[in-house]
């Protein structure tokens, strides 16, 4: 059981930074960054 | 992301539940075995070991063992997994920005060391002063009739207050140092956020090439690299106290199991029913306590029961 808990703790440790990867993917899915001038051109 | 969150929550629950349950069982068994072993020891052993300290030792050492076998190894493995995974993600998503982010590591390390060691010396001195003043109070209260008979009340109060004022001074310095360390730590944390996002903004503005994706850096890359490196570094920096706790647990375990495994020189229960007949004769017996070998208690003692 102790070894099982250690495996669980490693998985917890690996799981947390994966959020960074998913957040990165999510933001990139919005497309490349635009400058305020470009955004204004799109709106107007 | 939701699935990842649920997965981390589940693994975290299993880890904490099993490790705490295991540590609790271990601490209970250690205490039982310790007490059983202490009660079996011969009288001479209590001359060399202060019996008043044994109860406190049992609690303190079993707590150290409990931590060392329970939550701490798991936390250390968790930190290892987190740092490897975090740094890998950070460097995979954009190595050039990740390298730039590493510039905050020395500053954060220094602040982390200051934060963890702030006031440790002052705290120890404060505890010592408290102990000394408590010692005076205990001494005075246990012999209160003598103190009153000689009119030494004010003298005892002065002695008691003398160490309390040292403790008060140390307490003030401790609070000041702790406040300063917390302020430094929070300032450094938010400073690292500012630095990370400033550099990320610069990378996007200058249109630096990200070889990981074969295009210029985007906002998502910056976030991924920043949080990956930060997770990795924080996990590394938090693993030092876990190593310390495991080492302390090992030392406590050695001391405790030395007592648990000690075979008494005179066993109170041999496990056999012995029928005693006749008389007991002492002839030319010499005896001294093991801790006071120069003070002979019995010399050529002879007697028959």
Image (cartoon, rainbow, N blue to C red):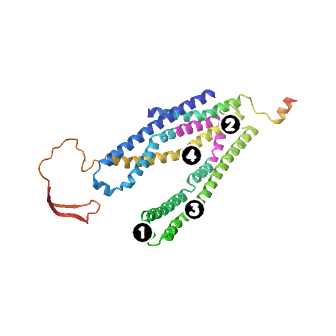
In this view, the residue in front, B217 or B239, is B239
Marks 4 and 2 sit apart, C-alpha to C-alpha, by: 21 Å
- In the rendered view, would you say B184 is above or below B141? above
Of the numbered discs 2 and 3, the one sitting upstream in the chain is 3
Q: Which of marks 1 and 4 is nearer the N terminus?
A: 1
Q: Which of the two marks, 1 or 4, is nearer to us in this view?
A: 1
Give percent across and percent down for residue B143.
42, 65
- Residue A24's tag is none
First of labels 1, 3 by sequence position: 1
Query: In the image, which is nearer the foreground, mark 2 or mark 1?
Result: 1
Residue drawn 71% across and 40% down?
Answer: B200
Labels 2 and 1 share a subunit: yes
Q: Mark 1 points at which residue?
A: B146
The percent position of residue B2, horizontal first and vertical second, equals 63, 28
Q: Residue at x 70, y 36 (%)?
A: B209
Marks 1 and 3, how far apart at CA: 29 Å
Query: Subunit of mark 4?
Result: B
Pointer 4 residue: B237
Give the alpha-carbon distance from disc 2 to disc 3, as whole Å: 47 Å
Please tell me in which quadrant of the rendered image residue B233 appears: top right
Q: What distance separates the C-alpha of mark 2 from that of mark 1?
A: 73 Å
User: Is residue B50 depicted above or below A35 in this figure?
Assistant: below
Left or right: B296 in relation to A7: left
SS at badge 1 = helix
For the magenta stretch, what is the residue range?
B78-104
Q: Name the residue under label 2.
A: B223
Q: Are marks 1 and 4 on the same chain?
A: yes
Of residue B255 and residue B53, the one placed in the foreground of this image is B53
């Amino acid at each position: 059981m102790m070894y099982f808990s250690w495996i669980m703790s490693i998985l917890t440790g690996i799981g947390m930074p994966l959020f960074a990867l998913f957040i990165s993917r999510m933001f990139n899915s919005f497309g490349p960054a635009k400058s305020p001038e470009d955004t204004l051109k799109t709106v107007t | 992301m939701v699935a990842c969150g649920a997965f981390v929550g589940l693994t975290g629950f299993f880890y904490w539940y099993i490790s705490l349950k295991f540590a609790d069982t271990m601490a209970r068994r250690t205490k039982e075995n310790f007490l059983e072993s202490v009660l079996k020891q011969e009288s001479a052993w209590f001359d060399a070991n202060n019996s008043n300290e044994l109860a406190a030792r049992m609690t303190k050492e079993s707590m150290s063992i409990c931590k060392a076998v329970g939550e701490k190894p798991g936390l250390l493995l968790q930190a290892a997994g987190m740092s490897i995974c975090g740094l890998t993600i950070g460097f995979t998503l954009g190595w050039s920005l990740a390298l730039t982010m590493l510039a905050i590591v020395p500053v954060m390390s220094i602040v982390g060391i200051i934060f963890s060691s702030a006031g440790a010396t002052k705290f120890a001195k404060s505890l010592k002063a408290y102990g000394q003043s408590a010692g005076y109070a205990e001494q005075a209260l246990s012999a209160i009739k003598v103190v009153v008979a000689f009119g030494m009340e004010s003298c005892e109060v002065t002695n008691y207050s003398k160490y309390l004022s040292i403790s008060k001074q140390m307490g003030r310095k401790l609070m000041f140092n702790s406040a300063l360390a917390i302020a430094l730590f929070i300032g450094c944390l938010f400073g690292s956020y500012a630095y990370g996002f400033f550099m990320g903004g610069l990378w996007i503005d200058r249109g630096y090439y990200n070889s990981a994706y074969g295009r210029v850096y985007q906002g998502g890359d910056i976030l991924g690299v920043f949080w990956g490196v930060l997770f990795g570094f924080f996990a590394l920096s938090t693993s030092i106290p876990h190593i310390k706790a495991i080492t302390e647990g090992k030392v406590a375990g050695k001391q405790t199991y030395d007592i648990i495994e000690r075979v008494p020189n005179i066993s109170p229960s041999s496990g056999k029913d012995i029928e005693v007949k006749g008389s007991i004769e002492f002839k030319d017996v010499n005896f001294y306590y093991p801790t006071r070998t120069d003070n002979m208690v019995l010399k050529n003692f002879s007697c028959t029961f």
